[in-house]
DNA sequence: ATCTTAGCTTAGACTCTGTCTAAACAAAGA
DNA sequence: TCTTTGTTTAGACAGAGTCTAAGCTAAGAT
């Protein structure tokens, strides 16, 4: 059962069949789907669901603070149900798979006062990049 | 005189008037323009320059490794001539102004082995967010 | 149970950013 | 000069996302 569905219940928000299917798609660890991938998965269970509803619903979940909207590549946004534990991301340059990761300390502490340009700095997010085990194996073969 | 123009000379790359205008636009510290902003600025000096040339030229500069392509918001990409000094970014949530910043140490060191999921991790970039001095003043008035 | 009304869903038009194509153009080298 | 290669251009196209207007549901009032 989706943790996100439970969290959404706590808001004054009508849980329609369409919204439930979308919320249930966004379940599990290391989940970072595009709107289009979510539409595909939702369609598998509810073929008549519309693209507009998927976009509307995702934007509402983001507005409620129950889903994160991520911009890694400048193409499509990705949606992440893991808002409970503050985390960063590790992306494979080969295949694009994206893992949730945690750093040893708060990155806000690594920005010294004289690098803050007078800003009130409230948030820091790190994007790590590299090659996943599968793609490393592929690279090795090629050489 | 643009530092980027000098760096581009070192590559086998024809420096046409159009390319020069674009390169000269990308000069200075904390510069992170969108393609459209670059087109506007280029048009001011060369009204007949085309959108396609701006996009072509920016992509070539990125391919040559002399300009960075950044994706902050999932809308338009931004172009950054500061490739010489490894740096991160601090963005104002109010007005969008984006500063180059430097951390006290390499963020790659903050990702422990048991958080690497078997990846060969090669890069880390941090996006800090907050409010710039101007926008802080505005927020204060509102309250 | 029926009515009313606010909210939800839908198809499709539209916008915005960026890429591609094909033709015209410019410049370097033979 | 001629040829060849690389560059610029307008406009068509594509992908991601938003908006609109109409129809549909469902919660609350009677
Ligand atoms: Mn995540
Ligand atoms: Mn920068
Ligand atoms: Zn991979
Ligand atoms: Zn600001």
Image (cartoon, coloured by chain):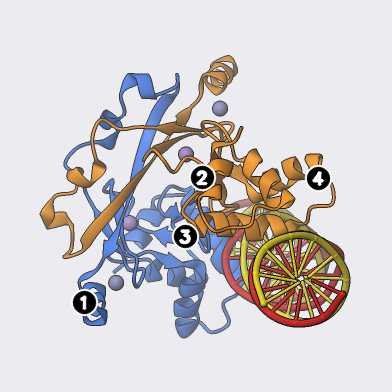
Chain colours: A blue, B orange, C yellow, D red
Foreground disc of the pair 4, 1? 4
Q: Which residue is mark 1?
A: A140
Q: Which residue is mark 2?
A: B7
Chain of the residue where label 2 is placed in the rendered structure:
B
Q: Looking at the image, which is closer to me, C13 or B57?
A: B57
Foreground disc of the pair 2, 3? 2
The disc placed on residue B46 is: 4
> Is disc 3 on the same chain as disc 1?
yes
Image position of B81 with respect to A1: above or below: above
Q: Earlier in the sequence, mark 2 or mark 4?
A: 2
Residue A86 quadrant: top left
> Is disc 3 on the same chain as disc 2?
no
Instruction: Name the residue located 52 percent from the left edge and 32 percent from the top edge.
Output: B30
State how far apart marks 4 and 1 are (Cα). Answer: 48 Å
Foreground disc of the pair 2, 1? 2
Foreground disc of the pair 4, 3? 4
Task: Name the spot of residue B47 as percent of width and height, x first.
Answer: 84, 46
Chain of the residue where label 1 is placed in the rendered structure:
A
Assess disc 3: are there few (<14), some (14-19) or many (≥20) residues with their C-alpha within 10 Å of its C-alpha: some
Image position of B17 with respect to A90: above or below: above
* Image quarter (top left, top right, bottom left or bottom right) of the N terminus of chain A: bottom left
């Amino acid at each position: 059962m989706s943790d996100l569905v439970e969290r959404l219940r706590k808001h004054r928000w009508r849980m329609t069949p369409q919204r439930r299917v979308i919320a249930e798609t966004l379940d599990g660890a290391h989940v970072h789907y595009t709107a289009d991938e979510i539409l595909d998965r939702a369609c598998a269970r509810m073929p008549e669901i519309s693209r507009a509803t998927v976009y509307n619903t995702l934007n509402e979940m983001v507005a409620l603070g129950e889903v994160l909207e991520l911009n890694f590549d400048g193409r499509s946004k990705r949606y992440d149900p893991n808002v409970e534990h503050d985390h960063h991301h590790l992306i494979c340059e080969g295949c694009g798979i994206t893992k949730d990761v945690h750093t040893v300390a708060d990155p806000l502490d690594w920005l010294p006062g004289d690098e803050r340009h007078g800003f009130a700095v409230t948030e820091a997010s790190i994007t790590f990049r590299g090659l996943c085990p599968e793609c490393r194996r592929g690279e090795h073969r090629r050489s």
